[in-house]
Image (cartoon, rainbow, N blue to C red):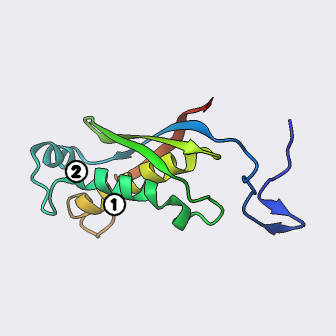
Amino acid sequence: MDDTFTHIHEGRARMVDISSKPESSRRAVASGHICLKPATIGAIRSRTIEKGNVLATARIAAVQAVKRTWDTIPMCHQIPIAHVDVEFDVMDDRVDAVVEVRSVGKTGVEMEALHGVSVALLTVWDMVKSAEKDETGNYPQTVISDIRVVEKVKEGI
């Protein structure tokens, strides 16, 4: 296994040159979740959160995040996004988010999928934070965790 960092050259960070790589179909799926109070989960389900439809807003935020990953993560390439799908599963104690990203290009889309999940979950938190605060204004039960790449696929063209 090669353990050199492709983003480090002569001690400094750099964007990897992908100009000579062939284009291929790329797909990545990432997931994560946010733990919330049962009352907050109920309010999400009944769509009674004061700020509006939590999941619709988080879905839009995830798509925007995917499209702007290159603008947030310094060494990511700006790539053509062909498809984004955002799914939520509202459980009794948490909201699970799954983001699928597809592209045809010279580099993978796993960072885009991870960024989409992260921003989706942060948006959920922002939308429900008034319901999640305790008497001191803190969030002892609210936790975003387990953000990871579930699947990464590269197919030749």
Q: CA distance from mark 2 to mark 1?
A: 23 Å
Coordinates of residue 151 in the picture (x, y in percent): 54, 32
Residue sitting nearer the eye, 21 or 119 = 21
Tell me the SS state at disc 1: loop
Residue identifier under label 1: 139
Query: The N terminus lies in which quarter of the figure?
Result: top right
Coordinates of residue 6 in the picture (x, y in percent): 79, 53
Residues at discs 2 and 1 in contact (Cβ within 8 Å): no
Residue at 39% x, 44% y: name it: 84
Q: In the figure, is residue 99 to the left or right of 107?
A: left
Asked if residue 141 is positioned above or below residue 86 in the image, the reply reads: below
Disc tally is 2
Q: In the figure, is residue 127 to the left or right of 146?
A: left
Residue at 32% x, 38% y: name it: 87
Tell me the SS state at disc 2: helix
Q: Quadrant of residue 75?
A: bottom right
Residue 133 visible here: no
Q: Quadrant of residue 152?
A: top right
Q: Amino acid at mark 1?
A: Tyr
Residue sitting nearer the eye, 115 or 34 = 115
Residue at 30% x, 50% y: name it: 59
Residue identifier under label 2: 56
- Along the polypeptide, which appears first: circle 2 or circle 1? 2
Q: Quadrant of residue 133?
A: bottom left
